[in-house]
């Protein structure tokens, strides 16, 4: 009976580790192909063994060349020393290596079919477990993406107030310094406009939402999407960093930190996704 065991852990690429008896080494490429047909990503440890049912069957074989050598030596002893030359088959059987023990071996076709069937069962079982784990990961992805969207909405709402707060604080600061000197309204408006252009994060917010939409679409796909998720998470992280830098607002920076913490958790789980 052939027994195959498969264990998988997260990895950015596919890495197949085989543990096979020496007699199965010739089937290594076939086993790797079977794994590759079902698993696209991750470290895969495969162990294949054969277990005999009941008592193991042995074949017995007479070591004819050795028997011939023993008989020749016995005759020489008899001729040289004048000993009685009486040797029976039972005496010969007691001599070392006269009888060779060879376990009965399956044919290559039988071994191939046995390995294929064992691997099929193991891969189906592995796939079932991976699908169950995948559903849990998908739900976790969904929850974390919802949290990031919520933070993004708060950042967008706060961004619309940043310029107003800057204009108000600038007027107050200039007013305190100028005392009774008349303020140059045009100059103030120009400074506020420059600040507004510099801290505008509308494009970053729009791109982040687009990336989140893509991410949501990918996790619902039946295709292999692990590397695509990795790429999207890198892009989202880049947009959040830009938002935090450009906004020049402590509240937005704080929310950006919260979003990056969620991204890090998503990145860890994305390693488990094909």
Image (cartoon, rainbow, N blue to C red):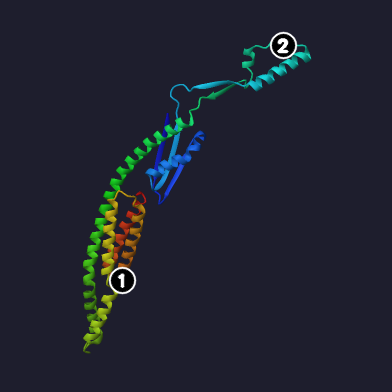
The residue indicated by pointer 2 is 85
Residue 185, image x, y percentages: 21, 85
Within 10 angstroms of label 1, few (less than 14), some, or many (20 or more) residues?
A: some
In this view, the residue in front, 144 or 96, is 96
Q: Secondary structure at mark 2?
A: loop
The relative height of residue 241 versus residue 146 in the rendered view (above or below) is below
Q: CA distance from mark 1 to mark 2?
A: 106 Å
Residue 254, image x, y percentages: 29, 64
46 to the left or right of 217:
right
Residue 170, image x, y percentages: 24, 79
- Residue plotted at (40% across, 47% down): 42
114 to the left or right of 100:
left
Q: Return the mark for residue 75.
A: none
Within 10 angstroms of label 2, few (less than 14), some, or many (20 or more) residues?
A: few
Quarter of the picture containing the N terminus is top left
User: Which quadrant of the figure has residue 94?
Assistant: top right
The relative height of residue 35 versus residue 231 in the rendered view (above or below) is above
- Residue plotted at (34% across, 62% down): 235
Q: Secondary structure at mark 1?
A: helix
User: Which quadrant of the figure has residue 183?
Assistant: bottom left
Choose the circle earlier in sequence order: 1 or 2: 2
In this view, the residue in front, 77 or 63, is 63
The relative height of residue 273 versus residue 46 in the rendered view (above or below) is below
User: Which quadrant of the figure has residue 74?
Assistant: top right
Residue 19, image x, y percentages: 47, 38
In this view, the residue in front, 138 or 92, is 92
- Give the label, 1 or 2, closer to the camera: 2
- Residue plotted at (23% across, 60% down): 150
Cβ atoms at labels 1 and 2 below 8 Å apart: no
The relative height of residue 216 versus residue 120 in the rendered view (above or below) is below
The residue indicated by pointer 1 is 246
């Amino acid at each position: 009976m052939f027994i195959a065991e498969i264990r998988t852990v997260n990895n950015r690429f596919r890495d197949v580790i085989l543990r096979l008896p020496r007699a199965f080494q010739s089937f290594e490429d076939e086993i790797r192909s079977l794994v590759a047909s079902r698993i696209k990503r991750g470290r895969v440890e495969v162990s294949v063994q054969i277990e005999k049912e009941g008592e193991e069957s042995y074949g017995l074989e007479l070591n004819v060349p050795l028997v011939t050598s023993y008989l020749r030596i016995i005759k020489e002893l008899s001729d040289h020393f004048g000993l009685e030359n009486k040797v029976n088959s039972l005496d010969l059987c007691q001599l070392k290596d006269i009888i060779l023990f060879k376990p009965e071996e399956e044919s290559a076709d039988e071994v191939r079919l046995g390995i294929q069937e064992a691997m099929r069962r193991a891969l189906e079982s592995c796939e079932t477990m991976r699908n169950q784990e995948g559903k849990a990961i998908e739900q976790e992805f969904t929850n974390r993406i919802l949290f990031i969207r919520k933070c993004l909405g708060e950042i967008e709402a706060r961004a619309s107030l940043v310029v107003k707060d800057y204009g108000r604080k600038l007027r107050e600061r200039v007013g305190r310094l100028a005392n009774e000197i008349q303020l140059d309204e045009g100059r103030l408006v120009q400074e506020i406009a420059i600040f507004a252009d510099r801290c505008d994060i509308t494009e970053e917010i729009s791109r982040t939402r687009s990336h989140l939409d893509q991410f949501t679409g990918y996790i619902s796909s039946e295709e292999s999407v692990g590397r695509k998720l990795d790429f999207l998470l890198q892009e989202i992280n880049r947009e959040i960093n830009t938002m935090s830098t450009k906004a020049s607002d402590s509240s937005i920076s704080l929310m950006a930190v919260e979003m990056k913490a969620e991204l890090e958790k998503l990145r860890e789980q994305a390693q488990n996704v094909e």
